[in-house]
Image (spheres, helix red, strand yellow):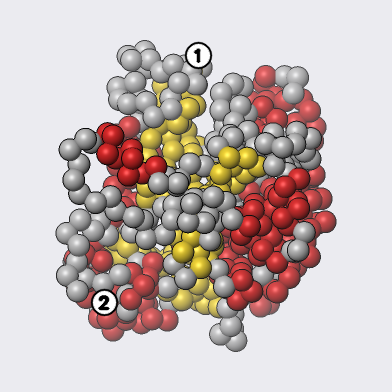
Amino acid sequence: MTADALEPHALVRLLGKPTAEFTVTDLEHAVEELGLRQVNLRYVGGDGRLKTIAFPINSRAHLREVLTYGERVDGSSVFPGTGTEDSDVYVVPRHRTAFVNPFGERRSLDVLCAFYGADGEPLPHAREQIVRTAAEVLHEQTGMTLEVFGELEYYLVEDLDERFAVEEERGYQESAPFSKGQQLREEVLGHLSSMGLALKYAHGEVGNIREDDRQLVQHEIEFWPVPVEEAADALVIAKWVVREVADRHGVEVTFAPTVSSSGAGSGLHVHARLVRDGVNALVDDEGELTDTGRRLIAGLLEAAPALTAFGNTVPTSYLRFAEGSESPEGVSWAATDRTGLVRVPLAWGGGVLPRMVAHANPHHAEPVPVPDVGPQTVELRLADGSADVHLLLAGMAVAARHGLTDPDSLERAARWNADDHDDFAQLPSSSAASADALDEARDMFEADGVFPGELIDAVLEDLRANTDGTLAKKAAKSDSARAELIRKYWHVG
């Protein structure tokens, strides 16, 4: 196979094969050809963040051992609540996830890992195992694969700059020099592409906020639909890269759901589609939403109150629900409507693509390419930057399975359509209410062994411990109390 000259992933270009086919021998060859002297084994911890173990390469035999076996780690330090008497666990490299790390003192090969217990079985409460199990159960019961991508929003915070001053709430797809941080954003984009993440684009987002001595400028990275397990890894890697690049530029960055007394917060909207045998099952040949699409929507809406436990994990998440101009207003859905919890965005259906191309380019004579998989998605506008993304996406797979197998889901989809109705249930208004919603729906998530009961208990405990009821009440009346609450949950996710 000859590598695509435009392929941004350095290892794919070098090895001439897709990441799914990477072997230990391939990675050894890449290390030697690229002159790498270190391997970083990475995994997602119980807090949803990316962790690292660094290995200097002592010899070819040592490199093969690290890339094959991985290492032992202290599970009681990785997953809160794990007993110290049974805490040794293995992290084993997943070769398809390998990439060249552009940061650090010296270039290294990084590989994401999976967790296994002393018996060699997958660790059921490990993040990557939960989302993998959710995807496998969905496919076994429906024959479909859930593909998703996130819209990752974040703020860059710098000293106030009056040159080409930012205009509040006018940042959507703004260009430099009016868009602050465009260079940093493009640097992030380059790194993510070279790591093999499937990206669509990056741009300035609506949120421009001016305060007395600083400006907060919002940005967004949008990914490309991939199987749900890959999408979860991509979001965790992207957050790490954004933070690394911002830190190297001396710029503060936050993914917090609420960042100021005014202006938009940062959401984490997730687009989803169901694929069967390479065909998008959400729409028919005319681009119209199918019963499968409606069942998916119904499943997501029914599970939505409980999904806040994974997607909206801090008290300031609920300030965003109450005050955000584009945050969800109720458990409803509609086409292109940005106030509902689920929307069906435009997707070049109904034969419009050739007409638009011909009109924009009157002399265009080349055939218009047709996507391998139809681009239609449904967008869940629930989560924010505090989300534990592996648990969130695993929960969405559970919700999809429920919607597809529940005989009442089509009736629910009709009842929750904002085009025909206007009275809808509301999402939880606090961390404690989110915990109650998850507790009530826990049987759905624990079914088929997807979410271990002990993990659900831990999530409930964290939500109830983080309620901050007194401070939240003060924040409604006092700007200083509000600022204190926002700062407490500034570095989330």
Query: Which numbered circle lies on residue 212?
Result: 1
**In the image, 110: left or right of 474?**
left
Check disc 1 and give the amino acid type.
Asp
Q: Quadrant of residue 291?
A: bottom right
Q: Which of marks 1 and 2 is nearer the N terminus?
A: 2
The residue sitting at 41% across, 18% down in the picture is: 166
Q: Residue furthest bottom?
A: 119
Numbered circles on residues, count: 2
**Tag 1: Cα neighbours inside 10 Å, few (<14), some, or many (≥20)?**
few
**In the image, 189: left or right of 284?**
left
Residue identified by numbered label 2: 26
Query: Which numbered circle lies on residue 482?
Result: none
Residue 203 position in % (x across, y down):
38, 35
* 483 vs 46: above or below: above
Check disc 2 and give the amino acid type.
Asp
Q: Can residue 455 be seen in this view?
A: no
Q: Do the residues labelled 1 and 2 touch (CB within 8 Å)?
A: no
**In the image, 265: left or right of 230?**
right
What secondary structure is found at the residue carrying circle 2? helix
**In the image, 279: left or right of 461?**
left
Q: Is residue 483 visible?
A: yes
Front: mark 1 or 2: 2
Residue 190 position in % (x across, y down):
29, 47
Distance Cα–Cα, label 1 vs label 2:
54 Å
**Tag 2: Cα neighbours inside 10 Å, few (<14), some, or many (≥20)?**
some
Image quarter hosting the N terminus = bottom left
* 221 vs 179: above or below: below
* 431 vs 470: above or below: below
The residue sitting at 40% across, 46% down in the picture is: 351
